[in-house]
Image: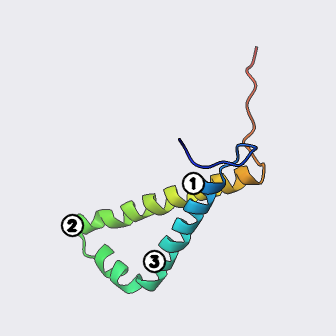
């Protein structure tokens, strides 16, 4: 079974989970700013850490944002085929 959805099929649980994860990630980035910058600047293998962090933040925040807009009823327009 997927995420919990309300009667209209809106992803309430998904929005809450990814919203909380977004807040936690941003809070950790601000609280541990100095050690994160030190590790990201080491070079070598550590050069991949900023890229991995960007993908993580992008995925979590993007999932929250998509669920949030779905809860508000905003959906992408569907293109019509050209016949």
User: First in sequence: mark 2 or mark 1?
Assistant: 2
| Marks 1 & 3, CB-CB < 8 Å contact | no
Q: Residues within 10 Å of mark 2 (few under 14, many from 20)?
A: few
Q: Residues within 10 Å of mark 1 (few under 14, many from 20)?
A: some
Q: Residue at x 70, y 47 (%)?
A: 10
The picture places residue 46, in percent across and down from the top left corner, at 26, 68
Q: Quadrant of residue 83?
A: top right
As rendered, which of 29 and 70 lies closer to the eye?
A: 70
Q: Residue at x 66, y 48 (%)?
A: 5
**What residue would you read off at disc 1?**
63
Query: Could you tell whether 5 is left or right of 55 in the image?
Result: right
Give the tally of numbered discs: 3
Between circles 1 and 3, the one closer to the viewer is: 1
As rendered, which of 80 and 60 lies closer to the eye?
A: 60
What's the CA distance linking mark 2 and mark 1?
Answer: 31 Å
Q: Residue at x 25, y 75 (%)?
A: 42
| Marks 2 & 1, CB-CB < 8 Å contact | no
**What residue would you read off at disc 2?**
44
Q: Quadrant of residue 77?
A: top right
Between circles 2 and 1, the one closer to the viewer is: 1
Query: Could you tell whether 49 is left or right of 6 in the image?
Result: left
Is disc 2 placed on a helix, strand or loop? Answer: helix
Decide: is 52 above or below 3.
below
What's the CA distance linking mark 3 and mark 2?
Answer: 21 Å
**What residue would you read off at disc 3?**
29
């Amino acid at each position: 079974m997927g995420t919990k959805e309300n009667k209209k099929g809106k992803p309430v649980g998904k929005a809450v989970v990814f919203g909380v994860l977004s807040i936690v990630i941003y809070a950790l980035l601000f609280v541990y700013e100095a050690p994160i910058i030190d590790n990201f600047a080491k070079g070598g293998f550590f050069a991949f850490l900023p890229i991995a962090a960007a993908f993580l933040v992008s995925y979590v925040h993007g999932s929250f944002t998509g669920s949030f807009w779905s809860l508000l009823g905003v959906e992408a327009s569907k293109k019509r085929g050209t016949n």
